[in-house]
Each structure stands twice: as structure tokens, then as C-alpha cells.
Image (tube, rainbow, N blue to C red):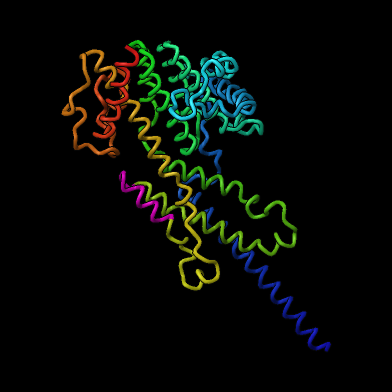
Amino acid sequence: MRRLLRVLLIAAAAGLAGYLTWDRVELHRLDGAIADIAARGEPVDPASLRQEPADAQQQQAALLYADAATRARDLVQQDGRLMRFDVDGVVGRVDLEEIESTFRKDSPPLQLLDRATPLPFAGFGHAIEDDPSFSTQWLEALSALACLRADLLAYRGDGDAAAASLTAAVRVQRTLPAVFTQSLAANRQIGSLRILLRHASPSAAALAALQAAFADMPDQDLIEHDLLLRRATMIDARQDYLVPRGIPAAAAFALHPFLVRRLRTEIEEFPEVIAASHAPWPEKIGVISALAQTPAYNYRSPTAVVLFGPVPNMAAMSSSVTQAASRLVARRLGLTTLAVERYRRVHGGAPPADLPSCPRSCRPFPSIPSAASRSSTSLRPPTTCSTASTRTARTMADRSTGSAR
């Protein structure tokens, strides 16, 4: 009996020693993977991707946006409908007078936003982003409030004020760090552009300023930057990942090497997805979607599949490729719509389909944007638009003829 007990104790000690050794090996491999990323000059800390305000105006813009976002949070928490109202909706029409009785167009967050809009913005910097009370998710709420104000003003026929409010909303995009939230904001802004052209007639100067705001948004999909930021955030927060909260210490100890291995696997998936993000549009969607359905490369052997199941490629699944496409389309659709509207005002009609600056054969996502797509003064649709985008833009602009004139 003693011999059996001794054998069991030795076996348990050997198993524990082996388990601890495996844990140390996995930690060493994780550290090596992180070191390889740093050696390539890629970020391993999200702080390295932050941009610090370079002058007093940029610092003032950062403070104004941060304060406005905090106040927008308070408004939205009081009435969550403020981010969902569609004043032009066919189903579930809203009472404008009821909205205007509770929603002030000169509310504190919007006043702060109006002050920040004309200022240059480079980033929030460490002082603001390290403040626990600050969260960039409320910047999207701030944009939604500005869109709602634009919708209400357009419905009341104040085209210039509505265009100015929509311009402020569009420029909030420059403060949003993630493609996903940029896409949500951009889609909401395109809806407000439709309402603006349907119910109001902004001046030429107001339309030019709004077109300039769309043109200032980057004409790249930003997927690679988003992936680098996501990976750096994972690395920076790895202790929270490896020591889950809310579970017993014994369970955390038992799961630790598995969690380390899984984290390393997720980190090592990113280079393949980052490379795929360089594919041309629209093939990029299919390439990254195929990667998302492919098991993580450390789990592709039959034995690994039996032990761990089909582990998906989390880097590809979290790449926000469709959201990146949506944001890019929203930018180009906004530019094209405003160019069509401004062209019609000057020439008395919509531009012809064979206008040289918008050939029928152009792709919706060319790799090189044209100068016209970045110009705030161009009256011609940018060459980055597709034929479908131009038709949509003409439709949005055509509706303004009978509704606002």
C-alpha cells in the first residue's frame, strides 16, 4: 500500500512538474512571439499608435471633443432613442415636435462640438486616453446627436444650419480609433445627407464645406491600422486574458498554459491577415472571409482538431473588413452625391453618365484615389465612384429638386 501511495505521489509530482514546465515553455514562446513583433518595428503597445497634440489648437480640440463626448454620454444614457431616431422613416414615424421639446439643438455637447469642428485634430494623447472616465465609444454618440440636429434643422428648412451640423458630425470620424465605430458613424451620416437634400436647400458654400468634410476623411480602408491596434491592445492587456476574473484560483492555475497557448496563437494569426488586407477591393472581402473560416494554423493538424475542435482564425474574424468597406463607400458616396448636386446647380442638370471624371468602367475600390476625390472644390463626381454609386448619388440629389425647390 505504501509503495502504491509512493508511486502515485511520484507520478503526481512528475505530472505537476511537467505541467509547470509546459506552462513556462508556453510563456517563453509567447514572449518570443511578442519580441519578434517588436523586432519588425510593429507596435506591441497601443500607446505607440497614439498621436499627441502638437500645438495649442490641437490640444484644445482634443479637450473639447473629450468633454463633448462625456456630455453626450449623459444625454444618451437619459434617452437612448436619441441615437436611433429616423425623422424620415416610413415605418414608425416620429413626432418632431415631441423630439424638439426634449432635445435642445444648442445642448452643451453640441456647443462644444461646434467649437471643436473648425480646429485641427491630431489625437487625444496620453493625458486624455489614460483617464478612466474617457471612452471613445461616446464619440459615436456625439456624432449621432449632431446628425439628429441636422435632420431636425433640415426638416424645418434651415439648410445651411443643417449642413453645418452634418459637417460637424462627419468630422467626428477623425476622432474615432476603430473602423467598426467609424462605419457606424458614417452610415448614420449618409442617412442625414439624404434627409438634408430631400428637405432643405443649403447654399453653395454650405455644400462645399460639407463636401470638404467628406474629402478630409481618409480614402483608405484602414484595416491594417485597425489590426495593428487590435493586436497591440491584446498584448498590452495579456495579463487580464491570462488571469480571468471571476473563477477560482485553482481553475485559473489549471487553465493557464492553455490560455497562454491560445493567446500566442491569436497573436501569430495577425501577419497572415495583415498581408491579406493588402489585397485589392473587392477581392479583399473574400480573401479575409476565407481566412476567418480557416482554423488557426496552430490547430490545423487532425490531432489538434480532435483535441481542441475547429478553432477559428480570430484575427480574420475581428478584422471588420465589411465595416471598412462600408465606411469607404459612405465617404465616396457622400463626395459623389454632393458633387452631383453642386454640378446640377451650376449646369442646370445632373452630369452625363459618360462624364470623363467618372467612367463607367471604374471600379468601386481602386487602389489609387484620384485628386478629384480629395478636392473640396471639385464639381465633378470623383473618379473613385462606381457607376452604381453615381446612380445612387443622382437619385439622392434628384429627390432634392422636387422636395426642397
Residue extending furthest toward the right: 2
The answer to which of 216 and 77 lies nearer the viewer is: 77
The answer to which of 367 and 185 lies nearer the viewer is: 185
Q: Position of residue 283 (x, y in %)?
A: 31, 48
Q: In this view, does 180 lie to the left or right of 239?
A: left
Say which residue appears at 28% left-offset and 36% top-offset.
368
Q: In this view, does 210 lie above or below 369?
A: above
Q: Where is residue 99 in the image (x, y as percent from the top left)?
A: 55, 19
Say which residue appears at 69% left-offset and 72% top-offset.
17
Q: In this view, does 165 lie above or below 46?
A: above
- Which residues are drawn in magenta? 279-292
Q: In this view, does 27 lie to the left or right of 89?
A: right
Q: Is the magenta stretch mostly helix, strand or loop?
A: helix
Which quadrant does the C terminus fall into?
top left
Q: Does the magenta stretch include residue 95?
A: no
The answer to which of 2 and 315 lies nearer the viewer is: 315
Q: Position of residue 221 (x, y in %)?
A: 38, 38
